[in-house]
Amino acid sequence: MLNDKVINFINKIFRNDDISKHIAKISQTELENVEIKITDIESNIFLDSATWSIDIFEKELDIEYVEDKTIDERKSIISAKLRGAGKLTLELIQDTVKAYTTNVVSVRFNGIIIIDFSDKIGVPNDIDSLMRSIEDIKPAHLGVDYIFRYRKWKDLNQFMWKTISKYSWKDAKEKEEIK
């Protein structure tokens, strides 16, 4: 029964009283609502399970809200910002890049930071946010080069024109897979 938890806290003499039963039922409903809210708050403390608290994370980290970003993209930006605290190292840059992409990325330093995405064809999704995050964590005097791999005209020779004609040049050049 719904109110069994609360009714057990009431003295045995009053347990059969209609008013006591009604109060126990209402109290149990309210306690269940509070438990739901506590669970929701607990899940929003952690970024991985956050929903409505993303706005709070962004405000605390001074991240500008962009309407066209998905929740996952917003979480990536927050994650990168959280990882970006402290001394700049190649590992920190790699961790920041990993927050935005699952691509295998090579990060090296040769007077400037070089971030190489050439394991796959094209530009990763949300590259603008990644670039902003890198700018936020790196010292102002360091430059950054991003390396992407594109398909060239000679790489398209293997395809029939009817296959390629349905793609824009941008898609033909950047899309990982052409069918």
Image (cartoon, helix red, strand yellow):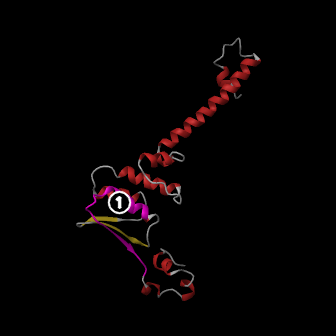
Residue 43 image point, x, y percent: 52, 42
Against 79, residue 35 (above or below) is: above
Residue 87 image point, x, y percent: 27, 51
Query: Would you call the spot at circle 1 few (<14 residues within 10 Å), some (14-19), or many (20 or more)?
Result: many
Residue at (53% x, 60% y) in the render: 68
**Farthest left residue in view:** 111
Q: Is residue 101 visible?
A: no
Q: Is 36 positioned to the left or the right of 122 in the image?
A: right
Type of amino acid under label 1: Ile
Q: Which residue is mark 1?
A: 134
* Quadrant hosting residue 102: bottom left
Q: Is 30 positioned to the left or the right of 119 in the image?
A: right
Residue 44 image point, x, y percent: 51, 43
Q: Quadrant of the C terminus?
A: bottom right
Between 134 and 162, the one nearer to me in the picture = 134
Between 11 and 86, the one nearer to me in the picture = 86
Q: Which residues are magenta?
A: 128-151
Residue at (63% x, 32% y) in the render: 32
Residue at (45% x, 54% y) in the render: 64
Residue at (38% x, 58% y) in the render: 133
